[in-house]
């Protein structure tokens, strides 16, 4: 079945809503003019909260929409804009909750000794809106780091307010899935001037350290997020390749945990952890340099590419 997704693009003007069908990009307004029944909210212009709430409640079989989009395209009523316009991040989330050491093999490669799951909880940290960039936007390498690294992650997009939800109900609060790259300055992620060993803010929260996209795939098209496959390559060489089945804390468990601490809101994102293969854990370590191209992809969703550039 073709993947139906929602994204945004720019051509000569402001960000514009797009519908993606099996990789082809169509202008949402053009589809509406062609008689295709789409959500009424323009998700790229500040209405993302309401759009995600409605998407969360809409567990339809999206193959019907895919067929209608295909019919409109075949009739010449709309045209594929892929390669002709620039895709943006689907939206600019204010909060990205990131799961640390959440894949068994990744924890092992980092030398992280974890308590038994029964005696533990997810370990989460935050990235904010300044970190978010879209497909093909450059990742700026801060002058202060020499150890810039990558982490492909499944992004779960919250679609309705979640407070004190159970793990068994938690996936009902997910509107869509996407792809995120948790870029990290490893040498800035530790401190020696304080008794606290790690500095997640300094290592993780620079501008552009969360490439996000390429679009939002409605959750109904990914009935089991633990089955997806994640890959990351640098300059064409595969560095990470794993499945979400390897997560210690599953997507639903992360949502349940966070909802015990705070109210999750539409537009919040969970970056749910990364598989093994990060640069710092390789022997010898491998770090990103200006000119390197990262490609992060998740089967059933899509891929994004970002090039590293030196800080001006």
Image (cartoon, grey):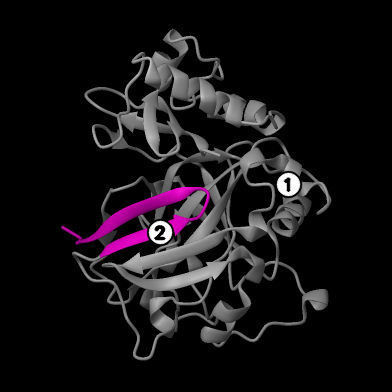
Is 121 magenta? The answer is no
Distance from the alpha carbon under mark 1 to that under mark 2 = 24 Å
Give the left or right position of residue 80, taking residue 57 as reference. Answer: left
* Residue 129 % position (x, y): 45, 45
**Dividing the image into 4 quarters, which one contains the N terminus?**
top right
Rendered position, 55 above or below 199: above
State whether the magenta stretch is mostly helix, strand or loop: strand
**Residue at the (70%, 62%) spot, across then down:** 250
> In this view of the protein, which residue sits in the foreground, 193 or 217?
217
| Residue 196 in view in this figure | no
How busy is the neighbourhood of tag 1: few (under 14 within 10 Å), some, or many (20 plus)?
many
How busy is the neighbourhood of tag 2: few (under 14 within 10 Å), some, or many (20 plus)?
many
* Residue 183 % position (x, y): 40, 63
Report if the CB atoms under discs 1 and 2 are less than 8 Å apart: no
Q: Which segment is the magenta one?
A: 293-312
Give the left or right position of residue 138, taking residue 190 as reference. Answer: left
Is 302 magenta? The answer is yes
> In this view of the protein, which residue sits in the foreground, 222 or 171?
222
**Label 1 belongs to which residue?**
171
**Residue at the (76%, 48%) spot, across then down:** 170
**Residue at the (49%, 68%) spot, across then down:** 200
**Label 2 belongs to which residue?**
296
**Number of dots carrying numbers:** 2
Give the left or right position of residue 88, taking residue 39 as reference. Answer: left
Q: Image quarter for residue 26?
A: top left
Marked residue nearer the N-terminal end (1 or 2): 1
| Residue 111 in view in this figure | yes
């Amino acid at each position: 079945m073709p993947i139906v997704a929602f994204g945004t693009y720019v051509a000569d003007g402001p960000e514009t809503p797009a519908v993606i069908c099996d990789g082809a990009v169509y202008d949402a307004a053009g589809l509406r003019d062609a008689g295709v029944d789409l959500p009424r909210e323009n998700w790229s212009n500040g209405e993302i909260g309401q759009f995600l709430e409605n998407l969360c409640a809409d567990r339809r079989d999206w193959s019907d929409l895919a067929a209608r989009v295909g019919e409109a395209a075949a009739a010449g009523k709309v045209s594929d804009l892929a390669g002709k316009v620039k895709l943006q991040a689907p939206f600019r989330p204010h909060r990205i909750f990131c799961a640390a050491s959440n894949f068994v093999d990744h924890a092992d490669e980092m030398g992280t000794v974890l308590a038994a799951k029964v005696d533990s909880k997810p370990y989460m940290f935050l990235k904010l809106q300044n970190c978010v960039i879209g497909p093909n936007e450059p990742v700026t390498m801060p002058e202060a780091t020499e150890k810039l690294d990558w982490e492909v992650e499944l992004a779960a997009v919250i679609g309705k307010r979640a407070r004190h939800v159970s793990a068994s109900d938690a996936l009902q609060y997910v509107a869509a899935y996407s792809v995120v790259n948790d870029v990290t300055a490893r040498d800035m992620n530790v401190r020696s001037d304080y008794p606290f060993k790690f500095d997640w803010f300094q290592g993780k929260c620079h501008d552009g350290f969360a490439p996000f996209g390429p679009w939002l795939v409605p959750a109904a098209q990914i009935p089991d997020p633990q089955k997806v496959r994640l890959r990351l390559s640098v300059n064409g060489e595969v560095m990470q390749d794993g499945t979400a089945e390897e997560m210690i804390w599953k997507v639903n468990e992360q949502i349940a945990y966070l909802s015990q601490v705070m109210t999750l809101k539409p537009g919040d994102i969970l970056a749910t952890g990364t598989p093994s293969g990060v640069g710092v854990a390789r022997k010898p370590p491998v770090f990103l340099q200006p000119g390197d191209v990262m490609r992060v992809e998740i089967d059933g969703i899509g891929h994004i590419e970002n090039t590293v550039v030196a800080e001006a």
